[in-house]
Image (cartoon, rainbow, N blue to C red):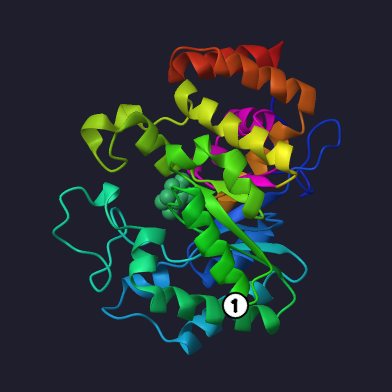
């Protein structure tokens, strides 16, 4: 039986054998930081910066951004904070950046592609992040969304490092980047898997469309295989691989993700306690066995039940 998460004291995320798995928060604005800390977040695994851009019809100034990033970083002294640069397009359209007439915006000029096309916005964001980093004591990591190629990885990491960002990585949320993770992680300092988009693109099913919602299931063995590719590449290159999609908030799937090679998990802060309690019940060897059982399944539903069975053996 699962330990009572509500009454358990907050400890750092770890497996039963003591393997450390930092449990981090997904945040959409700096105001959420205090609650995340209270709920036991050991840092931030995904800070979505779209909130600064979505409510306006022009980009925020460097000063406005610096203020927001400083507030965020100041809430996590000595802790890792992963900030994602602007992810505009598809489910997060921005009037001043995206073309509203694209027929397939999910396959269009979005994420890092849109930033490259409007590089001033990316440069201003990196300027503000570097300034906030200099003014605070958090361990700032910066990553790019929707990276699909090694070339995009090299472009982003080189630019970020030019601005003094010490740890530059990429999100893996497109199948091509999962398949190329061994190449991507030669240059990138880390990868963070976005399971929401990775599932959407792997199953070719719009994540916002109700009629295909049954495909949007990160338990699908096709998604798990891609995650394994990234986990293996992280191990081979000695680079961290985080998970920041909704999948990490499912306690049993969190165990599977660790078994596939994830070295940290980031989630909505309210999910931290249950995930922490469940991880504590399994060793890394057990997590790998549970992941192997899920990988062998033919469907999302059977992967879940195979994992469930393996977890209770
Ligand atoms: C994801 O795609 O899994 C992710 C974390 O990014 P977002 O949900 O913001 O697209
Ligand atoms: Mg995404």
Q: Provide residue 176's location: percent of width, then percent of height.
A: 44, 39
Q: Is residue 178 above or below residue 240?
A: above
Query: Along the line of sight, which residue is nearer the eye, 86 or 153?
Result: 153
Spot the residue most to the right.
18
The local secondary structure at tag 1 comes to loop
Sort mark 1 into few (<14), some (14-19) or many (20+) by Cα contacts within 10 Å: some
Q: In the drawing, does residue 295 fall left or right of residue 258?
A: left
Q: Is residue 32 above or below residue 256?
A: below
Residue drawn at (54%, 84%), measured in percent from left and top? Answer: 67
Q: Provide residue 203's location: percent of width, then percent of height.
A: 35, 29
Occupied quadrant, residue 212: top left
Q: Which image quarter holds the C terminus?
A: top right
Determine if residue 208 is in view.
yes
Determine if residue 266 is in view.
no
Query: Along the line of sight, which residue is nearer the eye, 210 or 131?
Result: 131
Report the span colored magenta: 240-266
Determine which residue is flagged by label 1.
Answer: 163
């Amino acid at each position: 039986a699962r330990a009572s998460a509500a009454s358990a004291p907050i400890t750092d995320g770890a497996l039963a054998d003591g393997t450390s798995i930092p449990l981090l928060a997904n945040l959409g604005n700096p105001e959420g930081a205090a609650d995340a800390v209270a709920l036991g977040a050991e840092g931030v695994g995904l800070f979505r910066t779209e909130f600064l851009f979505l409510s306006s019809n022009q980009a925020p100034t460097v000063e406005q951004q610096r203020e927001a990033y400083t507030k965020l970083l100041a809430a996590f002294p000595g802790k890792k904070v992963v900030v994602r640069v602007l992810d505009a397009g598809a489910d997060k359209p921005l009037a001043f950046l995206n073309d509203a007439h694209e027929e397939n915006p999910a396959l269009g000029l979005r994420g890092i592609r849109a930033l490259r096309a409007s590089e001033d916005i990316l440069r201003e964001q990196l300027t503000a992040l570097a300034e906030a980093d200099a003014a605070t004591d958090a361990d700032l990591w910066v990553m790019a969304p929707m990276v699909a190629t090694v070339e995009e990885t090299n472009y982003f990491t080189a630019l970020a490092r030019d601005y003094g960002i010490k740890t530059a990585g990429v999100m893996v949320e497109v199948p091509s980047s999962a398949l190329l993770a061994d190449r991507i992680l030669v240059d990138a300092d880390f990868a963070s898997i976005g399971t929401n988009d990775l599932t959407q693109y792997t199953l070719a099913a719009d994540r916002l469309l109700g009629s295909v919602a049954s495909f949007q299931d990160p338990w699908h063995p096709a998604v798990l295989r891609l995650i394994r590719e990234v986990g293996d590449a992280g191990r081979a290159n000695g680079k961290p691989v985080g998970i920041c999609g909704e999948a990490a908030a499912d306690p049993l799937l969190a165990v599977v993700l660790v078994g596939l090679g994830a070295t940290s998990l980031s989630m909505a802060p309210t999910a931290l306690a249950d995930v922490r309690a469940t991880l504590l019940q399994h060793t890394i060897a057990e997590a790998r066995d549970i992941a192997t059982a899920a990988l062998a399944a033919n469907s999302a539903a059977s992967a879940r039940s195979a994992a469930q069975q393996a977890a209770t053996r």
